[in-house]
Amino acid sequence: MNMIREVDNYYLNKEEPNKSCLLALRSIILEQDKNITEMQKWGMPCFCYKKKMFCYLWTDKKTDEPYILMVEGKHLVFPELEAGKRSRMKIFRVNPNEDLPVKTIENILQKALDLYRTGIVKLKE
């Protein structure tokens, strides 16, 4: 029997169109590198690269729109990323009613992964 993990419930409990949107974002993130793992942290899906937190999926409290939270956003220069009041992290907002900008998302994720791969962000040994 396949156990439903707590993190799976996060997605299953969402309403459409957010549910499909978040599930699509989840697969895009997981497809970027075989070293990416998913867990739940602070009630939200958290994605780690070699055990180091690298991004989260969440929905905006005011607009209810999904977004990807890039942990090391301060190192990433993309006009689509918003820092807001955060000093370290940046977010990429997604409109669940439109096609996902897959190429842009993949570019941002790959640049973020490069921070870890090249050692700009240190991985725990």
Image (cartoon, rainbow, N blue to C red):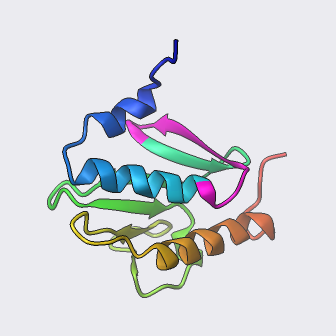
- Magenta residues? 31-44
Expressed as whole percent of the image width and height from the top left, the position of residue 71 reads: 53, 60
What number of labels is visible? 0
Residue 75 versus residue 7 in the image, above or below:
below
Front position in the image: 96 or 109: 96
Q: In the rendered view, tell whether residue 125 sits above or below residue 60.
A: above
Relative to 86, 97 lies left or right: left
Residue occupying image coordinates x 20% and y 49%? 16
Left or right: 32 as drawn, with respect to 66 = right
Residue 31 position, x and y percent, is 61, 57
Q: Picture quarter containing residue 24? A: bottom left
Does the stretch in magenta take in 94?
no
Q: Quadrant of the C terminus?
A: top right
Q: Can residue 54 be seen in this view?
A: no
Q: Residue at x 56, y 48 (%)?
A: 47
Above-or-below relation of 92 to 22: below
Residue 91 appears at what percent x and percent y?
Answer: 40, 68
- Residue furthest left as drawn: 62
Q: In this view, does 105 lie to the left or right of 114?
A: left
Residue 121 appears left or right of 5: right
Q: Most extreme residue toward the bottom, as rendered? A: 79
Frontmost residue, 64 versus 53: 64
Name the residue furthest right.
Answer: 125
Q: Where is residue 4 in the image (x, y as percent from the top left)?
A: 45, 22
Q: Can residue 110 be seen in this view?
A: yes
Q: Which residue is drawn at 48% across and 79% down?
A: 104
Q: Quadrant of residue 120?
A: bottom right
Residue at x-position 53% and y-position 85% = 77
